[in-house]
Image: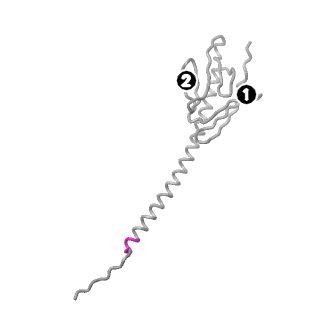
Amino acid sequence: MKKTKEKYQGFTVFECLVALLVISLVTLLINDLIRVEKQLRESNQLSSALKWHLFLIQLENSSQEWQYVSSTQQSITFKDRLDNHSDNYLIIEGGQKQLKKRKRGGYEPLLFEVADWSVRESQKGLSLKVEMSDGGHYESLFYQWQQVSEE
């Protein structure tokens, strides 16, 4: 007579080890993905601050060539410093999620990913507030931009 082995229902030790290995690898992978996502979010925030500072530098450089004339809540108007008699104006305005410099029909983008922005005049100077698409809020006060009196 032949002996037959009894077959038991269930998993072998090898199958259990493979399952544990897969679960631990997936857990480690998810942990690394969360860490990378956090780093990307932080670097994006840094990138937003960097864009804001580059924008401020561009405005400062523009103010060397242009005289501040006026502002509304959504635009800033400058006039050419060298040519007081011409109607050569430069306007900084928003639209299409960007701030742009408009001059003689053309425009140059200055700051991208802008959710909202506003300009406010005060005794101290011109205040510019910007909210970026990533949620960053920035504000700067330009003391040198005083209202030009028409003579």
Q: Residue 144: which quarter of the image? A: top right
Q: Residues within 10 Å of mark 1 (few under 14, many from 20)?
A: some
Q: Quadrant of residue 20?
A: bottom left
6, 62: nearer the viewer = 6
**On the image, numbered disc 2 is attached to which residue?**
107
Q: Amino acid at mark 1?
A: Glu
**Residue at 23% across, 86% down:** 2
Q: Which residues are magenta?
A: 11-16
Q: Position of residue 38 (x, y in %)?
A: 55, 51
- In the picture, measured across the screen, residue 73 lies left or right of residue 58, that is right
Q: Which mark is residue 121?
A: 1
The residue at 40%/70% (across/down) is: 17
| Residue type at the position of mark 2 | Tyr
Contact between marks 2 and 1 (CB within 8 A): the answer is no
Q: Main secondary structure of the magenta part?
A: helix
Image vertical order of residue 134 relative to residue 127, above or below: below
Q: Horizontal and vertical percent for residue 23? A: 45, 64
| 3D distance between C-alphas at marks 2 and 1 | 24 Å
Pointer 2 or 1: first along the chain: 2
Label 2: few (<14), some or many (≥20) within 10 Å? some
Q: Looking at the picture, how far across and down is residue 78, in whole percent? A: 65, 21
Quadrant in which the C terminus is drawn: top right
Q: Position of residue 48 (x, y in %)?
A: 58, 39
